[in-house]
Image (cartoon, rainbow, N blue to C red):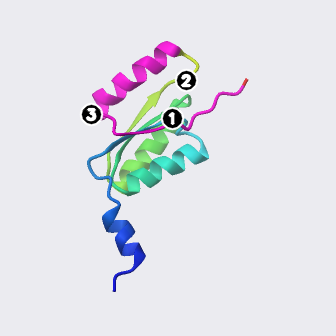
Amino acid sequence: MMSINYWIKNMFSLKGKKALITGATGGIGQAIAEALAKQGADVVLSGTRAAVLAEVAANIESTYGVKAVAITCSLSDVAAVEGLFAEAETAVGQIDILVNNAGITR
């Protein structure tokens, strides 16, 4: 009999899928990006801290062997948000998964 870990590993594949994660520089966003990458998804990481995004993207690519793209974007800027999806799709293709993780504090 096969274990549950076998089924999770082999039946829950996101290979070929593209995910956009906002707030990807924080702990939760980064963990979500890594979980999606671990299942084979290419990930687009969005956030406001460019250096952190680049570091997370490089780590995901080297660890999981998927494409990881960092795009700096402030969700409080409407024009930047409108451009985010176009830039993400240019980088990886059609987005299949959207994780709205970013928060704005005042």
Please report the bounds of the magenta region as a residue range.
78-105
Asked whether, in this view, residue 102 is left or right of residue 63, the answer is right
> Element type at marker 1?
loop
Q: Residue at x 58, y 47 (%)?
A: 28
- Does the magenta segment cover residue 15? no
Residue type marked 2:
Leu
Residue type marked 1:
Thr
Going from the N terminus, do you reach mark 3 or mark 1 first?
1
Callout 1 crowding tier (Cα within 10 Å): few <14, some 14–19, many ≥20: many
Q: Position of residue 35 (x, y in %)?
A: 45, 54
Residue identifier under label 3: 93
- Can the viewer see residue 63 in this picture? no
Q: Position of residue 99 (x, y in %)?
A: 48, 39
Q: Which residue, as the protein is rendered here, is positioned at the far top?
A: 79
Contact? badges 1 and 2 (CB < 8 Å): yes
Q: CA gap, disc 2 to disc 3? A: 21 Å
> Element type at marker 2?
loop
